[in-house]
Image (tube, rainbow, N blue to C red):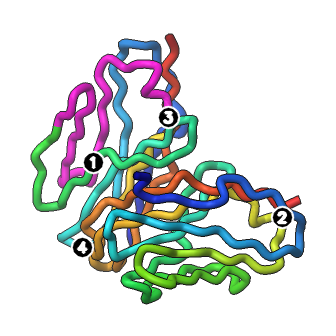
Amino acid sequence: AQKVTQAQTEISVVEKEDVTLDCVYETRDTTYYLFWYKQPPSGELVFLIRRNSFDEQNEISGRYSWNFQKSTSSFNFTITASQVVDSAVYFCALSSHTGGFKTIFGAGTRLFVKA
Amino acid sequence: DTAVSQTPKYLVTQMGNDKSIKCEQNLGHDTMYWYKQDSKKFLKIMFSYNNKELIINETVPNRFSPKSPDKAHLNLHINSLELGDSAVYFCASSHPGNAYEQYFGPGTRLTVT
């Protein structure tokens, strides 16, 4: 069975703090794909990043960085020097061959960044 | 030049009515999806079409019927609406296969009274 766990329901930080959102996944497939999406208060869902299972290289994009570790089945997301505009619900997601075209989403982590 | 569009954005209706939500994408993607997001923000896939062919049909009441007239459009028709159908419905599209990210529409907030 495939599963995505985002254990942190809500996180509250003060602006300029660094924050890490955790994502742990389960799959029996050796080839799979991991994603992060952002849902700001306006409600739309925005794609942030995709990572393939055979590429464990970490990625940095501005203040965002992602740490993919197959050994712990984790794909964590760090925001450096958080800003109020980072306040949103963040979803981690997984898709693999077993699931066909189906993407499994975690329950989401709601991030509050206070000024 | 909206990539994935949905209409209407808000839908308020009474129990027992029938309603439709329309979705269009101009990204040239072959695969389209319908998701339901409940009040706790949990996202669950309902249906997926690849080039007009139904490929995912989750455990959804048969009151929900998707229709894809062409690969750029995926509509959702709901019969005999119930209170529990109140949610935000998102349309999404992607390249075919499970390796690709999905691009979402703005969502349709359905309220059944």
What separation in Å lies between label 3 and label 4 (alpha carbons)? 30 Å
Report which quarter residue B12 is drawn in: bottom right
Measuring from the top left, give residue A89's x and y in whole percent.
50, 39
Q: The disc labelled 3 sits on which kind of residue? A: Ala
Tell me which numbered mark, 3 or 4, is placed earlier along the sequence. 4
Compared with residue A67, is residue B109 higher up or lower down, i.e. above or below?
A: below
Q: CB of mark 3 within 8 Å of CB of mark 2?
A: no
Q: The disc labelled 4 sits on which kind of residue? A: Asp
Mark 1 vs mark 3: same chain? yes
> Is A70 a magenta residue?
yes
Tell me which numbered mark, 1 or 3, is placed earlier along the sequence. 1
Q: The disc labelled 1 sits on which kind of residue? A: Ile
Tell me if A2 is positioned left or right of A72 in this view. Answer: right
Compared with residue A68, is residue A41 higher up or lower down, i.e. above or below?
A: above
Q: Which residue: 10% across, 46% down?
A: A57
Q: Mark 3 highlights which residue? A: A88
**Can you tell which mark lies on residue A49?**
1
Q: Mark 4 highlights which residue? A: A29
Q: Which residues are magenta?
A: A60-88
